[in-house]
């Protein structure tokens, strides 16, 4: 049911909620629908809610249940109501579920998780090892054809990579009778926020490990790693030999010439099927916090100067001053980088969306426990939600990323 916009005051207190519930145009279902839409639009924030007024307004006999609990016990009638699952009123469950989801998602998508936002998701229906078939390009195969002679045949070649199995991660957030009665909504939201934060942080770390090729995932996709598994062979993400060389050594980030060196390394990488240079258009530079301001200085300076012949110790060298020619690369950095890398002086240049991906079998989701869950009886758990996601990072094509080493 999608209720029309409420004519009265939309509030989260018991009085406003009760008025809406008693309005025949809305009722419990319409009230829940209005509140859920307000949450989705962010007109109401999760922390503006108190779960006890929600319970008392949306659950049949909810106010009586709270009064019975206040006296230190339940009558046989109320106990029968509890055992029959009245606590699991669909309207109450829907709105509390939306509150938990909104709070979890907010922390899961923390703005500090910068690499999660840059590496694209690739939806997948395969939990196990997955083969992604592709077609290699033909290349410059146009040949001279003599008069009356047949045209030669040319065709694409088979190309493929393997993606690692997806991994399920998650935890459970519970609402107890004590928290409900004492109206400790903050406890519920803090728990939901913690789950979202740690789930998002775990994903961010795994994506960083994939980009810098470190950690436990720095193994073949055949053994659940993030490395490039191309044509049935696994390769370290950064190579100095065939089938690609995407490492620039002796290239500490100091000035624009170091960025030029990284660009030249990328420009020399060729397509393995055609032998032609790959058209790499780097758009991102990745640095640790130690190099962040060096990168900003090099990239964001408004002008640059070059002395012809280097810096002469005598005479009057020719000096050229011009606008900064370095492309306005996006600078990505994180406090997590240094702890995930083997060194804090390496930096990276490339196109993240073409070099890496995140295999997603199920995005972050919340699932609610059924009404007859035994925890309701044995542990006085009114409601509980499982927060989880199923996915794994992988290397799509390392030819689109360069590592510079000091």
Image (tube, rainbow, N blue to C red):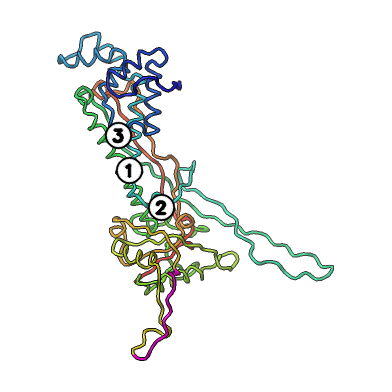
Sequence-earlier tag: 2 or 1: 1
Q: Is residue 318 magenta?
A: yes
Q: Classify 77 as above or below 370.
A: above
Question: Where is residue 278 drawn, in percent x and y?
Answer: 54, 65
Q: Looking at the rendering, in which quadrant would you find the N terminus?
A: top left
Viewer-proximal residue, 206 or 4?
A: 4
Q: Secondary structure at mark 2?
A: helix
Sequence-earlier tag: 3 or 2: 3
Left of 231 or right of it: where is 185? left
Identify which residue is drawn at 40% across, 16% down: 26
Residue lying farthest to the top in this orientation: 77
Q: Which residue is mark 2?
A: 223
Range of magenta residues: 314-325
Residue lying farthest to the left in this orientation: 72
Q: Is residue 173 magenta?
A: no
Viewer-proximal residue, 299 or 105?
A: 299
Q: Which residue is mark 1?
A: 199
Task: Tell me the mark number nearer the camera, choosing from 2 and 1.
Answer: 1
Q: Residues within 10 Å of mark 3 (few under 14, many from 20)?
A: some
Identify which residue is drawn at 40% across, 42% down: 390
Left of 211 or right of it: where is 138? right
Viewer-proximal residue, 223 or 54?
A: 54
Question: Where is residue 107 drawn, in percent x and y?
Answer: 32, 41
Viewer-proximal residue, 13 or 192?
A: 13
Report the disc number at residue 172: 3
Identify which residue is drawn at 72% across, 62% down: 153
Q: CA distance from mark 2 to mark 1?
A: 23 Å
Residue lying farthest to the bottom in this orientation: 315
Q: CA distance from mark 3 to mark 2?
A: 28 Å
Sequence-earlier tag: 3 or 1: 3
Q: Classify 300 as above or below 193.
A: below
Q: Classify 320 as above or below 401.
A: below
């Amino acid at each position: 049911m999608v209720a029309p916009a409420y004519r009265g005051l939309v509030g989260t207190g018991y009085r406003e909620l009760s008025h809406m519930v008693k309005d025949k145009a809305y009722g419990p279902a319409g009230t829940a629908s209005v509140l859920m839409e307000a949450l989705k639009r962010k007109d109401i924030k999760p922390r503006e809610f108190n779960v006890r007024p929600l319970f008392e307004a949306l659950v049949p006999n909810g106010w009586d249940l709270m009064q019975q609990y206040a006296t230190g016990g339940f009558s046989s009638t109320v106990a029968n109501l509890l055992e029959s699952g009245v606590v699991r009123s669909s309207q109450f469950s829907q709105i509390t579920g939306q509150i938990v989801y909104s709070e979890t998602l907010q922390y899961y998508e923390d703005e500090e998780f910068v690499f999660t936002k840059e590496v694209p998701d690739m939806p997948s229906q395969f939990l196990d090892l997955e083969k992604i078939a592709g077609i290699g390009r033909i290349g410059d195969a146009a040949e001279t054809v003599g008069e009356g002679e047949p045209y030669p045949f040319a065709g694409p070649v088979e190309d493929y990579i393997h993606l690692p199995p997806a991994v399920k991660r998650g935890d459970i957030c519970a609402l107890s009778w004590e928290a409900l009665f004492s109206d400790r909504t903050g406890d519920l939201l803090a728990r939901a926020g913690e789950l979202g934060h740690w789930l998002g942080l775990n994903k961010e770390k795994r994506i960083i490990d994939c980009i810098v090729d470190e950690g436990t995932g720095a193994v073949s996709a055949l053994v659940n790693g993030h490395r490039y598994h191309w044509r049935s062979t696994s390769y370290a993400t950064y190579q100095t030999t065939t089938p690609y060389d995407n490492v620039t050594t002796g290239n500490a980030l100091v000035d624009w010439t170091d960025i030029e060196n990284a660009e030249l390394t990328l420009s020399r990488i060729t397509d393995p099927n055609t032998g032609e240079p790959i058209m790499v258009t780097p758009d991102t530079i990745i640095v640790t916090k130690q190099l962040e301001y060096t990168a900003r200085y090099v990239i964001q300076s408004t002008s640059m100067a070059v002395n012809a012949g280097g810096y002469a110790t005598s005479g009057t060298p020719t000096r050229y001053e011009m606008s900064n020619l370095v492309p306005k690369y996006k600078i990505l950095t994180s406090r997590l980088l240094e702890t995930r890398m083997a060194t804090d002086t390496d930096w990276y240049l490339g196109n993240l969306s073409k070099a890496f991906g995140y295999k997603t079998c199920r995005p972050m989701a919340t699932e609610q426990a059924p009404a007859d869950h035994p925890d309701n009886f044995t542990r006085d758990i009114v409601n509980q939600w499982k927060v989880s996601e199923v996915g794994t990072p992988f290397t799509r094509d390392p030819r689109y990323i360069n590592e510079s080493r000091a």
